[in-house]
Image (cartoon, rainbow, N blue to C red):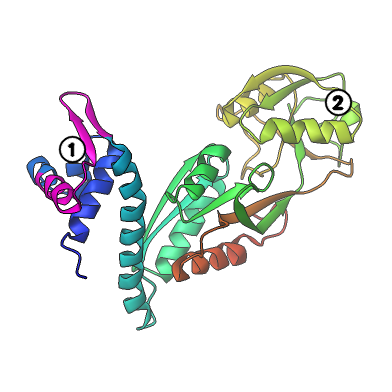
Amino acid sequence: MTADFSLRQLEYFVAVANTGSMSAAAVQCHASQAGISTAITDLERRLGVQLLVRRRAKGVFLTEAGTRVLAHAQAVLARAEDLRAGAKAEKGQLAGRLTIGCYATLSPFLVPPLVDGFTRLHPAVDLHFVDGSQEEIRQSLLDGTCDLALLYETGAEAGLTCTTVRTRKPYVILPPGHPLAGRDAVSLTELADEPLIVYASPPAPANADRWLHAAGVKAAVRYRTSSIEAVRGLVARGLGYSMLIQRWPTDASFEGLPLASVPISDPLEEVRVVVAHAANVVPTHRARAFAEYARETLATPEGKD
């Protein structure tokens, strides 16, 4: 039986569902709002169900049937994209859309070199990336918004298949005039009475609690902030110390004030950065190629970013 609706109609419907309005979908699809509306009305007629509730000045809402059809429409469009990409792959060329998610704190360190390098190798791949909190990116994998994601393993395992691409040891940052700033390494017990500045975006607080507990230290938390640069800025101004994972290319705060980075002597477990995909999804060839490229590119020694 031949379907009497088009991929373009499904594309328009998915765009409206994702953006919440005909006008936003029109911009996204480079089409007119009238064309979007007509296509979806015709799709509803052909399917025999109402997909959307249209409310003037309030956008559109999916009906119960629309919610069910949306999942199928997304799957059909994904298969169509894979078919197109597969045809090009027969000629030895990776192609098609690939969306990568990244935990926001990791993005400045990982996204630029990976996007630049991978697109140079595979220019026909339509590579996109999004960043956000660890949980936002995990949900993007589970709902199919992202094909792959770069995350910390801690707190990301549920529903995902994870492959380690990098391991890092936590370290402390101190103001340069601190008595311990010139040491080769420092124990967390030596900082037990010092004010701690905590990066508040998960999984960072859980990591800090675990490291302190392993060292037998009860933290004296002074400030919490969801800005990693604010953490570094507060430390640079002598208001406390903090524990970080990723190594900045320069020991200076956003204001340009100096910082001291000191390894931790306690035997703390390493933190794993992983490339992940939804456990119930078989990655496409281009997704597997990106994961392999990430593993090769990020397998650098500590401090060599």
Q: Is residue 59 magenta?
A: yes
Residue type, label 2: Leu
Element carrying mark 2: helix
Q: Is residue 71 above or below residue 18?
A: below
- Whether residue 125 appears in this view of the structure is no
Q: Which residues are magenta?
A: 38-61
In percent of the image, x 63 and y 45: which residue is there?
Answer: 156
Name the residue carrying label 1.
Answer: 22
Q: Is residue 99 above or below residue 197?
A: below
| Viewer-side residue, 281 vs 104 | 281
Residue type, label 1: Met
Q: Is residue 42 above or below residue 63?
A: below
Residue 162 shown left or right of residue 100 in the figure: right
Q: Position of residue 96 (x, y in %)?
A: 35, 65
- Whether residue 100 appears in this view of the structure is yes
Residue 273 shown left or right of residue 31 in the figure: right
| Viewer-side residue, 55 vs 170 | 55
Element carrying mark 1: helix
Name the residue carrying label 2.
Answer: 191
Q: Position of residue 120 (x, y in %)?
A: 41, 67
Q: Locate the N terminus and report the quarter of the image it occupies.
A: bottom left
The Cα–Cα distance between marks 1 and 2, rounded to whole angstroms, is 57 Å
